[in-house]
Image (tube, grey):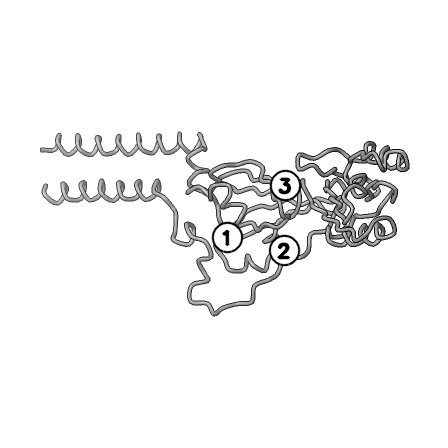
Amino acid sequence: MVREKRTCFLMVIVMGVFFLSACGPTHTFSHMTYLADSIGMNPQTAKAANPIVLEKGDRITIKVNALDPEKAQIYNGGNSAATMSTNANAVGTVLGGSSSNQGGSPSYLVDDNGEIKFPQLGALKVVGLTTAKVADTIENWLKGYIREPLVTVELINFQINILGEVGHPGTITVPDGKITIIEAISQSGDLTVNGLRENILVVRQKDGQRQYGRVNLASKDIFESPYYYLKQGDIVYVEMNKNKLLSSDQLHIRRVNYAALAFTAITATAIIYNSLKK
């Protein structure tokens, strides 16, 4: 009788342990940390970011300064009295080819031909050029019209979108056009405990084609990834890990409930059977 009780009790314990282990968390240390394999590594040379080049659909601001601010004003969307009569065509180009910006400088949209329309200069091919190269090109041209021109070009619609298991999903605007995926996630409130760090999806559009890349934040190899530095319009999606996926799976929840019910029934049956044999 004592042996039967011990056998029954052992069976209940084993089933309970099995049930609890099946329902328990599956996190490991590496799943909860960044760059888990970098511990003890020797210093490595940091990879520099590639210069940002303009693409179709980008919007830039162009600010022109010179020794004579009044002459430079026409290129900034202004209508000075001294230049209004002699540059009427240029004014029309500014109003038709650009829109005003909150900072005071006109903004220009890179059209489907990869061009912007700049006063007097007309159509300027900018696609594939850096903002610094565009500024140099305009400065060289302006030297024939105004003394010592200084041109500043900025990309103003550099945005990325972050979705999924982060603290604050949404759109991030990057004023200087340079951001890494780690910086973007940090600005989004970091990954939640349910975020899958090993397989983050980055969707990128380039040359009319959509590219899909995967990034592993738990590995040091992320620094060598072409998706470490994000680009204009990138979409970053952080998937939910297995625990979150299972907890949100209603079928799995029902199965767990059925297993719990079956475990309870078996336990009760064993207790009743053992009591009746006394």
Q: On residue 226, which mark appears? A: 2
Neighbours of disc 3 within 10 Å: few (<14), some (14-19), many (20+): some
Whichever of labels 3 and 1 marks the residue nearer the N terminus, that label is 3
Quick one: 87 or 38, which is closer to the camera?
A: 87
Whichever of labels 2 and 1 marks the residue nearer the N terminus, that label is 1
Measured as percent of width and height from the top left, residue 17 is found at 27, 44
User: Would you say 62 lies left or right of 14 here?
Assistant: right
Q: Which residue is mark 1?
A: 217
Secondary structure of the residue carrying tag 1 is loop
Secondary structure of the residue carrying tag 2 is loop
Do tag 3 and tag 1 residues touch (Cβ < 8 Å)?
A: no
Three-letter residue code for mark 1: Leu
Could you tell me which quadrant the C terminus lies in? top left
Whichever of labels 3 and 2 marks the residue nearer the N terminus, that label is 3
Residue for point 38% across, 53% down: 29
Three-letter residue code for mark 3: Gln
Measured as percent of width and height from the top left, residue 10 is found at 20, 44
Q: On residue 159, which mark appears? A: 3
Residue for point 47% across, 57% down: 35
Three-letter residue code for mark 2: Pro
Neighbours of disc 1 within 10 Å: few (<14), some (14-19), many (20+): many
Residue for point 62% across, 61% down: 48
Front disc: 3 or 1: 3
Residue for point 46% across, 67% down: 41
* Distance (Cα) linking label 3 and label 2: 18 Å
Measured as percent of width and height from the top left, residue 206 is found at 72, 47
Secondary structure of the residue carrying tag 3 is strand
User: Would you say 278 lies left or right of 249 here?
Assistant: left
Residue 91 vertical position relative to residue 204 in the rendered view, above or below:
above
Quick one: 69 or 233, which is closer to the camera?
A: 69
User: Would you say 121 lies left or right of 223 here?
Assistant: right
